[in-house]
Image (tube, rainbow, N blue to C red):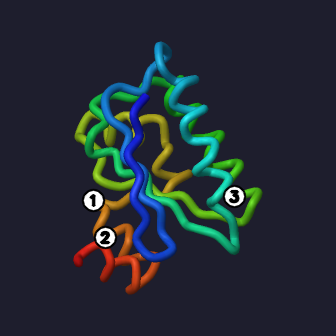
Amino acid sequence: MNIKNKTYGDVLVLSPEGRIDHANSEDFRNSLVPFIDRCKSDGERMVLDLAGVDYISSAGLRCFMLAEKQAKAQGGVIVVAAMQPVVKEIFEISRFTLVFDTFASVREALARFSPAALQAYQA
């Protein structure tokens, strides 16, 4: 699975594309590993930009849960932003909105983390 990444200050933005389902969830999870390792209390915070994700299954949600669990154990923070309506509905139905802070846009998520990250994003 293709995941674009960009760092703004001390915030890493990951932007997966397509569907996250049973067929590619393991690839997605494996693609996240090196980025999750950087998401620590003294490292980067992470925004998962889901604007390019048009569907997520329970297998995909499991990947998100495992990523959150690992980041939290390391003292890191992951938030979710820019969900498509279908993905947002799946997050709400599965109550993942209680697990992750969600934002309408990447800009809003970066503003939550730091003015420097927001300024770098807007530049």
Q: Is residue 41 left or right of residue 63?
A: right
Tag 1 and tag 3, C-beta contact below 8 Å: no
Q: Is residue 74 left or right of residue 103?
A: right
Give me the residue at 47% from left, 13% from top: 23
- Give the class, few, some or many, for how many residues have Cα within 10 Å of label 2's Cα (few <14, many ≥20): some
Tag 2 and tag 1, C-beta contact below 8 Å: yes
* Disc on the earlier residue, 2 or 3: 3
Disc sitting over residue 108 in the figure? 2
Secondary element at tag 3: helix
Give me the residue at 40% from left, 84% from top: 116
Amino acid type assigned to the residue bearing label 2 in the image: Glu
Give me the residue at 62% from left, 49% from top: 68
In what quadrant of the picture does the N terminus appear? top left
Q: Give how far across and how far down residue 56 sits, in percent.
A: 40, 29
Disc sitting over residue 72 in the figure? 3
Q: Marks 1 and 3, how far apart in space? A: 22 Å
Disc sitting over residue 104 in the figure? 1
* Disc on the earlier residue, 1 or 3: 3
Q: Marks 2 and 3, how far apart in space? A: 21 Å
Q: Give how far across and how far down residue 12 sits, in percent.
A: 47, 62
In what quadrant of the picture does the C terminus appear? bottom left
- Give the class, few, some or many, for how many residues have Cα within 10 Å of label 1's Cα (few <14, many ≥20): some
Q: Give how far across and how far down residue 121 sits, in percent.
A: 29, 72
Tag 2 and tag 3, C-beta contact below 8 Å: no
Q: Marks 2 and 1, how far apart in space? A: 7 Å
Give me the residue at 35% from left, 25% from top: 19
